[in-house]
Amino acid sequence: MTFSGQFVTCALVLGSEIRLDGPSAVNTYDTDTHRLVVNGVDTPVMQTTLMTKEVDVDAILAHNVVLAQDTVLRVTGSRPFAIVASGRITLERGAEIDVSDGGAGALAACSTLAGNGTNNTSGASGGGSGGYSGSGGRGGPGDNDGAAAMQLPSVRM
């Protein structure tokens, strides 16, 4: 799903370019305090809390965002994290946005377990679910309305 399906981007006031450099840099963003720290220095950044269809998301707003080669941005806090840009978001070779292991918006436990997919009378099988480091369920068996599958002719290239 695109962000435009979650919230209206046209009404947002976006900041200027954000560039994070260097493999030895310690870059962090906290979704609770809305603080971007670059190499130990608080760095002003445009941000907003977006109310989406499901949950509030803390978003950095910029024209362009660049994480230079081998740069890591570690994101923490209780809210999910987003970057909204009117231009480009560029992660150069080896750059990472790290929200792993208790990072931004991480849930300690999922309220529902992974389950099996369901049958679909239109043809394709239902997909298994998964997430939160759990294995997904078995996909559904596919078309169960009794109609024979349509055989397509083979094509030689």
Image (spheres, grey):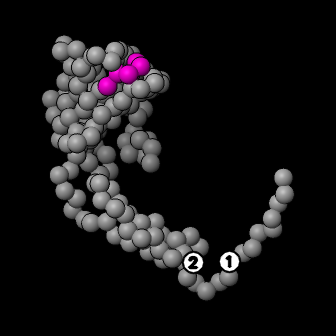
The residue depicted at 56 percent of the width and 70 percent of the height is 124
- The answer to whether 44 appears left or right of 92 in the picture is left
Q: Given contact means CB atoms under 8 Å apart, are the residues at marks 1 and 2 in contact?
A: yes
**Dominant secondary structure (helix, strand or loop) of the stretch shown in magenta:** loop
The residue that label 1 is drawn on is 149
Residue range (magenta)? 67-72
- The answer to whether 148 appears left or right of 49 in the picture is right
Give me the disc on residue 143.
Answer: 2
Residue at the far bottom in the pictured view: 146
Mark 2 neighbour class, 10 Å CA radius: few under 14, some 14 to 19, many 20 or more: some
Q: Position of residue 57 (x, y in %)?
A: 27, 40
Q: Quadrant of residue 89?
A: top left
Q: Position of residue 7 (x, y in %)?
A: 37, 42
The residue depicted at 33 percent of the width and 31 percent of the height is 97
Query: Is any atom of residue 145 visible in this view?
Result: yes
Q: Position of residue 19 (x, y in %)?
A: 36, 16
Q: Which residue is more in the foreground, 13 or 109?
A: 109
Q: Secondary structure at mark 1?
A: loop
What's the residue type where badge 2 is placed?
Answer: Asp
Q: Secondary structure at mark 2?
A: loop
Is 14 located above or below residue 149 in the figure? above
What's the residue type where badge 1 is placed?
Answer: Ala
